[in-house]
Amino acid sequence: MVGDALTRPKDLLDFSAYGRQEIEALLALAERLKRERYRGEDLKGKVLALLFEKPSLRTRTTLEVAMLHLGGHAVYLDQKQVGIGEREPVRDIAKNLERFVEGIAARVYRHETVEELARHARIPVINALSDWAHPLQALADLLTLKEAFGGWEGLEVAWVGDGNNVLNSLLEVAPLVGLRMRVATPKGYEPDPSLLQKAGAFFTYDPKEAASGAHALYTDVWTSMGQEEEREKRLRDFNGFQVNGELLRLLRPKGIFLHCLPAHYGEETTEEAVHGPRSRVFDQAENRLHTAKAVLLCLLS
Ligand code: CP
Ligand code: NVA
């Protein structure tokens, strides 16, 4: 199932070890898996540990279902049981899990935790979201954009909202496939300037300027998991950054709306946007499954 052309980095922590070829091969594999509604025995007998410090609907379910479709199995380990860095150091967790399972998908607060897991485990480690990156989400987003527009080269994707983990992964992957990013955040919530520069992204503090004429408008929550104490301040700071029908009208005629979900309705977006005609939000969610299958096949087989 995995083509010869696909080189295989050991882990997927962010896209720093990935080039255009790996991304294109992963996405081609995901498209094929989706088309064929593929189920097989490629990962028969293999087990993925899901080591999660934070809640999840899409990431946990798609990784579990993906393992099932590929003939393998997933074991869910939550923070209450494992106590990452509390009951047991990260290094020791890595050195145990590698003896039991063939891969680890970890959802963590600090990106350093997935890096440390990957350093100490001889098995693949997949970042299932950290404070720095959400690469599994970006892969599903790429597939969704390709389905909507036929390719990525020259597409303009506007990001309106927080300069967060989901944006970072898009900024990392954009230059590899020719996506052009247009980013608007409030002051104090800008993404890493070096990421913006590497992506050749356009940056503004004006949501309308970012959205005007773009192919897609993407947003995410203003308060990410772990930032709950900042919610009141963030609600004030993000005033004017809501992605609603009015902002969506500035897109080009066939422009689409993207959101990684979960949505905080009435904050960064509205019912009208998520459930309206421009929304591809639930295609994005579905594509989490097909792209997760491609990643697991690539790293674990
Ligand atoms: N988009 C996403 O990662 O969703 P979950 O937090 O539900 O996994
Ligand atoms: N930025 C959000 C994404 C959730 C999928 C968070 O980190 O909570």
Image (tube, helix red, strand yellow):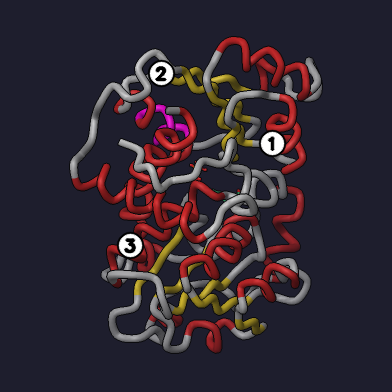
> Is residue 247 shown left or right of residue 93?
left
Say which residue label 1 marks.
Answer: 114
Disc 3: residue Cβ within 8 A of ligand 1's nearest atom:
no
Q: Position of residue 238 (x, y in %)?
A: 66, 71
C-alpha distance separating marks 1 and 3: 30 Å
Q: Position of residue 114 (x, y in %)?
A: 69, 36
Say which residue label 2 marks.
Answer: 73
C-alpha distance separating marks 1 and 2: 21 Å
Asked if 293 appears above or below 259 in the picture, the reply is: above
Look at the numbered disc 2 and give the secondary structure of its residue.
strand
Amino acid found under the numbered disc labelled 2: His
Say which residue label 3 marks.
Answer: 280
> Is residue 129 shown left or right of residue 43?
right
Magenta span contains residue 236: no
Few, some or many residues within 10 Å of mark 2 (<14, 14–19, 20+): many
Q: Nearer the viewer, mark 2 or mark 3?
A: 2
Amino acid found under the numbered disc labelled 1: Val
Disc 1: residue Cβ within 8 A of ligand 2's nearest atom:
no
Amino acid found under the numbered disc labelled 3: Arg
C-alpha distance separating marks 2 and 3: 30 Å
The image quarter containing residue 278 is: bottom left
Look at the numbered disc 3 and give the secondary structure of its residue.
loop
Asked if 28 appears above or below 234 in the picture, the reply is: above
Instruction: Give the residue drawn at x 73%, y 31%.
Output: 119
- The reply to whether residue 267 is in sight is no
**Badge 2 vs badge 3, beta-carbon distance below 8 Å:** no
Residue range highlighted in magenta: 60-65
